[in-house]
Image: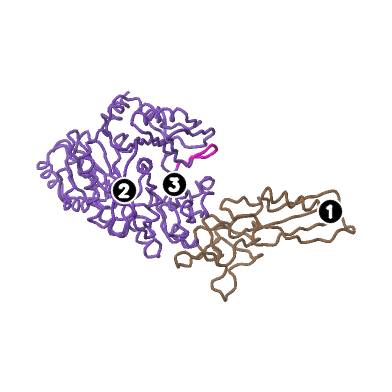
Chain colours: A purple, B brown
Amino acid sequence: MFSRILIANRGEVALRIIRACKELGIESVAVYSQADSNASYLHLADERVCIGKAPSVDSYLNIPRIIAAAEITDVEAIHPGYGFLAENAHFLEVCRDCKIEFIGPSLESMMLLGDKIRAKALAKEVDVPMAPDSEGAVESVDDALEIAEQIGYPVAIKAAAGGGGRGIRFAHNAASLKSMYTQAKTEAEIAFNDGTLFMEKCIENFRHVEVQLLGDKHGNVVHLYERDCSVQRRQQKVVEETPAPGLDPGLRDEICASAVRLAKACDYYNAGTVEFMLDDEDNFYFLEVNTRIQVEHPITEMVTGVDLVKWQLRIAAGEKLPFTQDDITTNGVAIECRINAEDPANNFRPSPGHVEAFVAPGGFGVRWDSHVYQGYNIPPTYDSLVGKLIVHQPTRAEAIAGTKRALDEFVIEPTKTTIPLCRRIMSEQKFVDAQWDTKYIEREMLGD
Amino acid sequence: MDIKEIKRLVKLMIDNDLTEMNIVDGDQKISLKRGPGEQGRVVMEPAVVQSAPVAQAIQLPAPSEPVAAEESPSSLIDVTSPMVGTFYGSPSPDTDAFVSVGDTISDSTVVCIVEAMKVMNEIKAECSGRVAEICATDAQPVEFGQVLFRLTPD
């Protein structure tokens, strides 16, 4: 096992990793920017190194500074968390060249799965279902028009180097395809330095269902079942739950098994998530693979009893998974609400600044993962996540009731948060009836 | 001023993380200074020439942790590290230090090396003045923003 690792991240995920390190007896080194210098979670790490000014490019995205910090603190490994450099193959390569273990997958599998075209080709090889698509890069507008005729409108035009809902355009007919194609290409070139595009048939009104995987360096891969992340606003998740409500058990097994097949086909190890779209006829389609730990990982931890971050550390240190697929069982229902410092009453305007009063909820089945506390200053420079409220109860109805009552216990002043939005969602009949799709919030709730 | 009083003042400085304190008390003047890696000095002088206690140097413990955002006494300018790495005060082990206390430097003066990933980066002062304190030692790990030198302004 490692004796010391560096955490190349901040906020709640940095705290999450510090906790796992402490429980495993691993010393932790936390890096921070000047905007985070007073954050109290830093004092839970064994050492702290300031790596730059507030902007991410000067700090949490700055590879030379992070590696320099790793060198002066003499760590054996780096955990990248999620976001920032977590899926940056170049960073993985630099770690490897500096003989520092990267806590995540191999370089080869990250590069393969990070290229959405290659990932789809591999998924096709192992019979993972997917939407009709361009079967490779789209070379020109004419090419795009021809492909759209074949696969049928509406179509989604996506960046091969993209991911996480970015770099996507939709076209409902030939007339709009031309300009959407050009827009997608330009955005891909700017955002991902790679203008390569592919196309897929657009699945309307789908549910987002993803499968958690854990693989070790000895070829073992297991799934830890699925999560339903359909409650989204502008393609960003707001509420996640497990199990996916109303999913036929046979279908569940099929989706999870296909995810494992894909992981094994590229010798995947450490934590990863395979994302799917589920249409209203129970057909599922491969979307993409996230080669990192995800924000919503706690709900899987609650129902399976498996600490995913501790396993990431153990796997990276070379340990074998001691459990087989049959050993993974689930218990009850877990729901997570992401609480952001945004004002739902004012178009989700960010609400950074000093948190003057703060009380977190508690009680049966409540888990609160957050770095925020009374007196904390939420910096304006980074994402607006305040924390994650996770409620674990024996049934879905109880999990919803528990979430409502926990949301009502929060005191966060004067910061504006998305707690009222989450509270509303818990009361929406369609959510209670699990009749939800990824466009529901925009369509039904924010129209007013 | 007796030793008990001096100890009280020293405790006051440590508790409030002060680096310099000057007190004039009737016909006596006491000046206390503390800094990392440097022997703190307590100097007591009579305000008027009289037979008076001899100036004594008292070792003061350094601040518990070098901090990126340490407040410096208002009169001194901080030269801080623009990168993360290992500090070296001279170009090589067997040559003289880039700068010494008392040297006058300008913004383009190379004051030290910070090594990171096997690259020796020469660090320029980016401000001018006279070197009052050298706050880092050879082979010491330094973080972004850490105070390396303090200068008295021109």
Which residue occupies the extreme bottom position in the image? Answer: B94
Q: Toward the viewer: B151 or A110?
A: A110
Does residue A23 appear anywhere in the picture? yes
- Determine the residue positioned at 53% across, 45% down: A40
Report the Cα–Cα distance between label 3 and label 2.
25 Å
Residue A150 x %, y %: 9, 43
> Which residues are drawn in magenta?
A372-380
Is B78 on the left or on the right of A384, as rendered? right
Q: Are marks 3 and 1 in contact (CB under 8 Å)?
A: no
What kind of element bears circle 1? loop
Residue that label 2 marks = A327
Q: Toward the viewer: B143 or A408?
A: A408
Q: Main secondary structure of the magenta part?
A: loop
Residue B57 x %, y %: 76, 61
Residue that label 1 marks = B2
Residue that label 3 marks = A16
Label 3 chain ID: A
Q: Earlier in the sequence, mark 3 or mark 2?
A: 3
- From the viewer's perspective, is the residue at label 3 or at label 2 nearer? 2
Is A210 on the left or on the right of B21, as rendered? left
What kind of element bears circle 3? helix
Q: Amino acid at mark 2?
A: Asp
Q: Are marks 3 and 1 on the same chain?
A: no
Q: Amino acid at mark 3?
A: Arg
- From the viewer's perspective, is the residue at label 3 or at label 1 nearer? 3
Report the Cα–Cα distance between label 1 and label 2.
74 Å
Q: Quadrant of the C terminus of chain A?
A: top left
Q: Toward the viewer: B48 or B106?
A: B48
- Determine the residue positioned at 58% across, 69% down: B98
**How many numbered marks, from 0 up?**
3
Which residue occupies the extreme front position in the image? Answer: A327
